Image (cartoon, grey):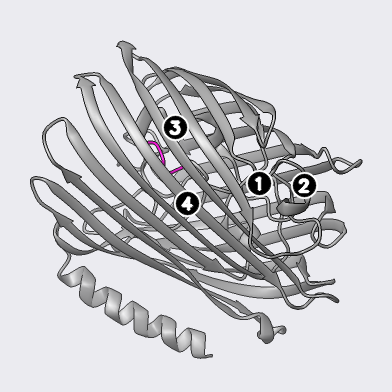
Amino acid sequence: MKSAVLFLILTAVSAAAWAQERRNGFAFTSPLLLSGGVEDQLLVGNRTVSDSTAVFSGPTLSLLKTAPRTEFELSYTPEFQMFSEHTDLNAWNHAAGLHFQYRFTPRLSLSIDDGLLRTQDPTRALGETVFLLPRGDFRENVFGTTLAYSLAPRWMLNFGYANTVSDLRIEQSTLPIISKQMANVGTVGVGGLLKARHRLSATYSLISFRDLSGRAGSLQSQPGISDPTHSGALTYRFGRERGIAFDASAGIMRGGIQSYLVSAGVERRWRTVMLRAAYGREISVFRGLLRVVTTGELTPALGETRLASGVLPSSVLQHVSIRFREKIGNRFGIDLRALAGRNESASESRHVNSLTGRLRLYFRITPRVSALVGAESYDQNFNQLLGRALERRRYYSGLLVSLSHRAQPIEITAAEQPGADITAAWPEDWGRE
């Protein structure tokens, strides 16, 4: 009940902000999602819960300031999750972000980014990931800063630093579980256009891991994991707004972690259809480890890694993903995603296999309001935190309401992460009448 009252208050404040929305000032950068449905086999500690739920997410309220040399954005996204019978699971989740960029000269710029997430439902909040986490108090902070220098009109030199801290606490299990890890990354990279549609980048990174929980089986108990690791990666991309796009990356890690990294993806876009298939082999480390270290075309394959609380960084993750989106006419939309992965740890004899999938159907009622129905599936044969299999289903329907000064497409974000650009992953004319 308290969550519902707070939501109504937030909506009233949001309406006032909408009335005074402008380029510099308060603005909405993601739509409001109102949904209700059923949770089936939600893992809470050592028990499973099936119940009716309601989720009110967003809108993201941002404070924007743009000047000739500076860009500033401070954003916050609330989410209220309420259960019909298990009211002790009701939660108010938070996501906040900070972005600052200053251009010293036309060729030299500095950017600072920080993202904070606190949620009781990490599997759903983290978006597409092969590591399925039970319900618990999850906190994550990702900080990064980048100094970029333009070597030529089409080439950039970047120096970056990033810090990621992840904290997961599961109090409702037989034995309370605490998993807290930190990573630091320093990166230097160069990249740019070879010619039209062809991009090449190379990066070198120095990575260090640290376990902050002191639990048995932590990073400190694994030989060499806490030692600094050197990583190098080379990335090639070919693509255009429509047609075929291709990307491939290869890298090597030496030091505390000995491994190699590879990834490849093929994407085909038509006017109203997008189809993508990808494969990756990487280290099971923190979500967003290098996401904010490099920008634009410099992001290496390691930047696509996901959180692995309870999974050692010595583990090797292989995954295959498929995405399909289609806009039918001016009102209907389909979004289908599937991700399969296998985790192979040097310290564990059994493999951890996972499969996740999501299907959403959209119908645009007006340029600002869309109805949706969706289903999500999460399966993992063994969860290393709880020592058991994990299986979960979600079925829901609801409304997406755009409160921006201009209508927004009928999707939230590529990975349902608050504060992201909701138009980035869609064709340029998606959602237009």
Q: Main secondary structure of the magenta part?
A: loop
- Residue under label 3, please give it: 299
Instruction: Give the SS element for disc 4.
Output: strand
Q: Of the residues tagged 1 and 3, which is closer to the observer?
A: 1
Q: Residue, x 83% and y 62% (percent of image)?
A: 386
Residue displayed at 36% across by 85% down: 9
- For image coordinates 27% across by 46% down, the residue present is 111
For this rendering, which residue is in front, 364 or 281?
281
Q: Is residue 152 above or below residue 5?
A: above
Give the Cα distance between marks 2 and 1: 8 Å
In primary-sequence order, the first of circles 3 and 4 is 4
Q: Nearer the viewer, residue 155 or 360?
A: 155
Label 4: how many Cα within 10 Å (few below 14, some 14–19, many 20+): many
Residue 26, position as x, y percentages in the image: 21, 66
Outermost residue to the right: 349
Query: Would you name the residue on which mark 1 appears?
Result: 226
Residue range (magenta): 291-295
Circle 4 sits on which residue?
163
Q: Quadrant of the C terminus?
A: top left
Residue 344 is a magenta residue: no
Residue 155 left/right relative to 364: left
Tag 1: Cα neighbours inside 10 Å, few (<14), some, or many (≥20)?
Answer: many
- Give the Cα distance between marks 3 and 4: 16 Å
Q: For label 2, count other residues whose C-alpha is less than 10 Å away and answer few (under 14), some (14-19) or many (20+).
A: some
Quadrant in the picture for residue 159: top left
Left or right of residue 354: residue 228: left
Mark 3 touches mark 4? (CB < 8 Å): no
Q: Name the residue carrying label 2.
A: 222
Q: Where residue 242 appears, x then y in whole percent?
A: 38, 21
